[in-house]
Amino acid sequence: MSRVLMKGNEAIGEGAVQAGCRYFFGYPITPQSELTHYLAKRLPEVGGLYMQAESEVASINMVYGAAGAGARVMTSSSGPGISLMQEGISYLAGAELPCVIVNMMRGGPGLGNIAPSQSDYFQATRGGGHGDYRTITLAPNSVQEIIDMMKKAFDLADKYRNPVILMADGVMGQMMEPVDLDDEAPAPEVVSKTWAADGMKGRGHKNIINSLYVVPEELERHNRELGRKYAEIEAREVMLEEYRLDGAEVALVAFGTTSRVCRAVVERARSRGIPAGLIRPIALWPFPYDFIAAVAAGVKCFLVVEMNMGQMVEDVQMAVKGLVPVHFYGRCGGMVPAAGDVLKEVETIWRGGGEQK
Amino acid sequence: MRKVFSRPESLRDVPFHYCPGCTHGVIHRLVAEVIDELGVRDIAVGVGPVGCSVFTYEYFDCDMFQGSHGRAPAVATGIKRVLPDRVVFTYQGDGDLAAIGTGEIVHAAARGEKFTVIFVNNAIYAMTGGQMAPTTLLGQVTKTTPYGRDKEINGFPVKICEMLAPLDGSAYLARVAVHNPKNIINAKKAIKKAFQVQLDGLGFALVEVLSACPTNWGLDPASAMRWLAENMIPYYPLGEYKTPGRTL
């Protein structure tokens, strides 16, 4: 074990290698370039393959082939590229194939810009592509957490045979922090994938990777089976971090980059006598509805802070069910909320008794 | 009594959904016979397209993928790169391969991906009801070219073998037809070569098979075979366009 300084983008790459991922298929886009540079160098060192595809559409379908063949495989991109991958992600979900997809979010809509943003929350947590499906969505907020989360992401993908999306942004990607790292990349974990279409080789029956169900009764059965799987994920895989919720009357909710800002806001609010606390969903889907509902019973109000025009706030509202006011503070276009500005918002809400403006 | 013909092991004993006179069935059989003869069924992994042959995963008796529209070469790339010792093939129609999937087929060929592509060209989108394909001939009437394909509006039919031949990664390219026994025999030879090129690790291999679609051409099966010979072959000349180390 050694302690090294790493960029978030590189940590995703090394975390993937540590998790036993040996295949990456992707297409260049900012702001995730360092991740691809890292893996292009690193994967051949461990007997893996880095392949640059002709498009994001091709990348995600290469992932589909590699995942169906039984490999731990990943891709990464950002907003526009992730949009292009959506048909493929829907196929992966429909055919129940495990993989990890990294979205280093940038501003949109359209070409937007390459500055940090959290505006792909809806896209990731609602399925994103066509049809009725969900993708497990994880949002780290430190470089060390990225390293640890990559292993978790691949394990969840294999456990549920479902795509997992890891969402961060340019701030997380560029940020350098010290991390604890295993000196030797462990050998890829052998996960038994009896369903993989990797050649029959004496298996005695053929395996098929498919999402087509022509008969309505069969597709409905498939949809219901997927629904049961998603319900199990919702019951078991909620991940969150709570910070100073003890005696809190203003509960902030934030993920990823903004959660770091909000942690500082809680400290400063507390020092000014405002009992603030923070809920940080680590998994964005499944979302911690029950936890937030329980917190709602004991606080005066919520303040959701995001780098978008208000997306996760809808999930918080669904959890709170109108019990107490849910306020929103958002910056977009690459603007990162300043702790001082969020603190002002907290003070204003607090002076108003937590009432909705 | 001597049995002179039987269903290949690589083809399942299930009813095909193809229309009467459609030559997909013949092409399926040729591919299955080649897989049997090369003894690679246990290590074969196929990728089907979206289109009339979307159900190939039901018909070939080996491991199969159903890929999204046009992306079979990308899916096959993922499979073959993970499992280089398997025999990987795609089975794609002309809408799938020569329109929506143009990017994937060109780059798979450019990378010299070591898999085999069976490209079925019947000059029409058949599953969706007979619309113009990238391979529809000039003047050919389809549901979306009711006055015939007009070069001013729709441009010219795409010749895939000729297009892929200059790419250094393509090792074997051939165009065959299945409208009569002689050509069916030649088609099988080409398909076998295309699999052998993969087994020998020589690079990308594609066989374009001119195929009949009586239903959407509005012809009876016998007339459809004649139409293929008289109209498609002159525009899409048969033969080997590239063999390992040689462009013809």
Image (cartoon, rainbow, N blue to C red):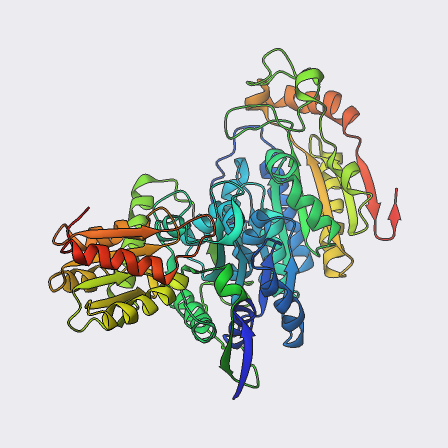
- For the point 81% across and 43% down, the residue is B165
Q: Who is closer to the viewer here, A48 or B20?
A: A48
Left or right relative to B128: residue B166: right
Looking at the picture, how far across and down is residue B229, in whole percent? 74, 24
Q: Who is closer to the viewer here, A357 or A206?
A: A357
Q: Examine the image and state in which quarter residue A199 appears.
A: bottom right
Residue A69 in sight in this render: no
Left or right relative to A322: residue A237: right
Residue A99 in sight in this render: yes
Looking at the picture, how far across and down is residue B69, in whole percent? 54, 41
Q: Who is closer to the viewer here, A14 or A242?
A: A242
Q: Who is closer to the viewer here, A278 or A350?
A: A350
- For the point 71% across and 26% down, the residue is B157
Vertical comparison of B173 with B232: above or below: below
Left or right relative to A103: residue A47: right
- For the point 52% across and 40% down, the residue is B50
Q: Furthest residue to the top?
A: B147
- For the point 36% across and 46% down, the residue is A309
Looking at the picture, how far across and down is residue B133, in whole percent? 62, 27
Looking at the picture, how far across and down is residue A325, in whole percent? 17, 52
